[in-house]
Amino acid sequence: MSSQQDFRAATRQWLESNCPESMRTPMVQDEIVWGGRNPSFKNPDGKLWMERMAERGWTCPTWPTEYGGGGLSKDESVVLRQELARINARPALTSFGIGMLGPALLEYGSHAQKLEHIPKIVRGEIRWCQGYSEPGSGSDLASLNTKAELQDEHYIINGSKVWTSYADKADWIFCLVRTDFDVPKHSGISFILFDMASEGISTNPIQLISGSSPFCETFFQDVRVPAANLVGRLNEGWTIAKRLLQHERTMISSFGLASGQSDRGGTTSTVASVEGAAMHYRGDKDRLSDPVLRDEIAQFKIDSEAFAYTSQRSIEESRQGQGPNATSSMLKNYGCELNKRRYELLLKAIGSQGLGWEGEGFADDELQLTREWLRSKGNSIEGGTSEVQLNVIAKRVLGLPDILSINKK
Amino acid sequence: MALVLSEDQQLLKDAARNFCQQSSPLSVLRGLRDSKDEAGFDAAIWKQMLELGWAGMAVPEAYGGFQFGYGGLGVVLEETGRTLTSSPLISTVLIGATAVNELGSEQQKASLLPAIVGGELLISLALDEHNFHKPSHIETTATPTSDGFELNGNKTFVLDGHVAKKFIVVARSSGNRESKEGISLFLVDSGSTGVTVTRTLMVDSRNAAKISLDKVAVTEADVLGELDKGFVGLDGVLDIARIGLAAEMLGSIREVFERILEYLKQREQFGVLIGSFQGLQHRAANMYSEIELCKSVVRAALSALDDSDKSRQEIAELASIAKAKLSEVFMLVSNEGIQMHGGIGMTDEFDIGFFLKRARVAQQFLGDASFHRDRYASLKNF
Ligand SMILES: Cc1cc2nc3c(=O)[nH]c(=O)nc-3n(C[C@H](O)[C@H](O)[C@H](O)COP(=O)(O)OP(=O)(O)OC[C@H]3O[C@@H](n4cnc5c(N)ncnc54)[C@H](O)[C@@H]3O)c2cc1C
Ligand SMILES: Cc1cc2nc3c(=O)[nH]c(=O)nc-3n(C[C@H](O)[C@H](O)[C@H](O)COP(=O)(O)OP(=O)(O)OC[C@H]3O[C@@H](n4cnc5c(N)ncnc54)[C@H](O)[C@@H]3O)c2cc1C
């Protein structure tokens, strides 16, 4: 206990002297630090903060020091998280490497693969994207068709992926490929890593309904990948793929968590919290004058708090050695539905000021909110749709029989 | 009360459907958005609509109209809702012409209605002042002057406000700001001194504007309806508008639903059509049921408008029933439209997102579901 208190004191002191002031303000979208070969830092403090945190391995606090991680115990990492929250510190580094690939690679990668990739993830030197979905293989991910054929120590990759978030900005991809077409679909999949600068790769950004273009179509034509880049054993990639999805879902489920007083990632604007916005836009002082909306918001808040306790409990349970499990499907589904509700309520809160697209007549944060509302609709699709999560819950948690097994190849 | 279309209405609906599908598909709205079109609607298509007589659909023959009734206008709106056609049909025909026809003097009707039917006049109601629809909460003032009134105030969500030649401005000529007494309507030229129009680009790519009125002079002859007692008439016009809007929403809802069904019968995952999953089937069946209710309330409300035996109270109830129900179901169906299409539903290139955006605006305009449930309860005295 006392060692934990020491750790807290030391951490607090270190953060006090190392977290730049501007990194203790609410995050703004275009200052998120993604890292990568050609990183962009709109705010120079972002670079400083990332580098300082990475040096201690605190961008990935629980990862082994051997690979550049922080080597913290679960308890210590909880303390670090609390201390970061105490000063409202921004995330020093955000990436698919941290949220998805890293944990899977630590579990399934070879020592050489970990040595090559993990430190670069910790330091934000390589930005990763996820090559899972294909035009014909979304929910039925295991039916994927992108092909990898072994030819003199290389896999030759042909096919295409779709909805690949930030494929146009990523340096490397973790990709699911089919290495055997003659066995049941789950048994012919491999998990492979390669450089997006390889010859034969092209990406084509796709615009979302919110107007931004974060995801892409990604094409592979005779892309040569060293055979050593295959993670785990040949044709056993599905296990890794699913494990990674659990990490992804846990990450996405955090959309459902409000941050402190705010519903929108700590912004200070009038539309930061649902109840704040509802009162502000009605000119209410102490009490929201619309009783129906008040009830709806209260219901939402209660669900949010209950969800936060559930996320917390799930972390504590996993600390006792259970790891993310099928309940991550419950968290993902509930968190995403909560986030969608939050945005519906935020728009309700501000009425016709939430109906703008661009230009005059709307404040910047109102326009931003409308776009975020549209973007939130994708939460129940990305990382496996809500329907897929509910199927996983029904099958894996509740043990209900599976009608699809009748249709298995 | 006829809950099925008459033969004439069916013919009109078929013709409207043909026209919209052929001449005004959703790609037109997309094009207007992408080119940041100045008018925000396609003038050539509007001209064809005028030739089809749509601007005079509910206008009496005496004023150049075709006396097809609101039932006629409703079926046209349902079809423009399917293709999300952007045109002055809502602002000028459904609301503007209705206001003039219902409230105007003989002289006002004779001068304005033929111009609307002929397409020379775009006219728009300038009502809302806040982020929420509260038609009796009017702060724009009309202060008497030696030869009329002076108007001061701000209006928002004024449909087609950037291209309208005239506004029907709802202003307070007496009473406190929450009172239904003391509200008057004024015809104001958009070019009048003191009128500033700011076009607002809306998420549904349809047209609206904010308007500020700074010492705008109007005369006694510009008063539409009775001075100080404008609210009752306004409320009646709003109910017609709400019902017409509900008809347009019905068309959009049916279109989204048909697109969903088509996709469920076409997209395969796990080696089967996704429409074979009960998780989706039950939701589709539920939407179908809700849409059946929507069709009924829209028909009931439209036919009540053309039925002279219906009381003001009955129409008000039907308007709130229709707008509440359709707002709720449009949100449901347009959200499902995205979700059931998966990743492709989130793309701009795919049309389904336009319906979600339209749903959000349409449900808000002229009162959202919660406004109309509250109003319904008041109308029913509970
Ligand atoms: C914003 C965003 C970012 C994304 N980023 C990435 C990324 O970086 N990398 C990547 O690989 N992918 C990414 N995706 C893709 C995402 O994982 C897929 O879109 C998702 O898995 C659904 O697949 P699909 O789009 O093919 O939909 P489909 O699988 O075709 O689904 C269509 C509908 O059918 C339903 N359905 C399917 N099967 C069942 C069933 N058995 N029971 C009930 N209902 C069912 C679905 O839930 C959905 O409602 C992203 C998607 C979005 C929206
Ligand atoms: C984005 C996304 C996220 C997902 N997240 C998860 C998740 O966290 N947990 C999860 O269980 N599923 C997850 N899935 C898979 C999802 O559960 C399935 O798509 C859905 O349940 C349909 O079944 P299936 O394809 O997994 O086949 P299932 O019928 O579910 O397959 C049964 C199980 O047996 C395994 N299996 C079958 N044959 C073989 C084989 N030859 N070799 C090895 N294993 C075999 C599968 O891996 C699977 O776990 C996810 C899917 C997507 C698209």
Image: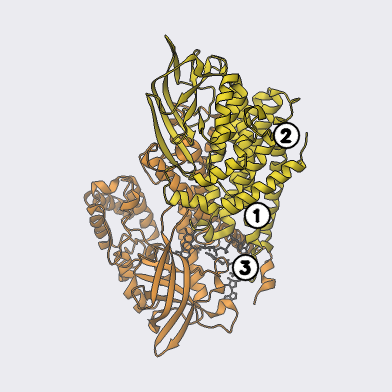
Q: Quadrant of the N terminus of chain B?
A: top right
A373 relative to A55, above or below: above
Residue A179 position within the rendered picture, expressed as x and y whole percent measured from the top left: 50, 82
The amino acid marked with disc number 2 is Ser
Q: Secondary structure at mark 2?
A: helix
Q: Which residue is mark 1?
A: B258
The Cα–Cα distance between marks 1 and 2, rounded to whole angstroms, is 25 Å
B212 vs B300: above or below: above
- Image location of residue A292, percent across then percent down: 57, 32
Secondary structure type for disc 3: strand
Q: Looking at the rendered structure, which numbered label has been put on residue A229?
A: none
Q: Are marks 2 and 3 in contact (CB under 8 Å)?
A: no
Chain letter of disc 2 in the image: B
Q: Which image quarter holds the C terminus of chain B?
A: top right
Q: Is residue A8 left or right of residue A381?
A: left
Can you identify the residue that label 2 sits on? B303
Task: Name the residue beneath numbered marker 3.
Answer: B268
- Label 1 is found on which chain of the structure? B
Q: Which chain is orange?
A: A
Upstream in the sequence, badge 1 or badge 2?
A: 1
Task: Calculate the distance from the C-alpha at mark 1 to the C-alpha at mark 3.
Answer: 18 Å
Write down which quadrant ligand 2 falls in: bottom right
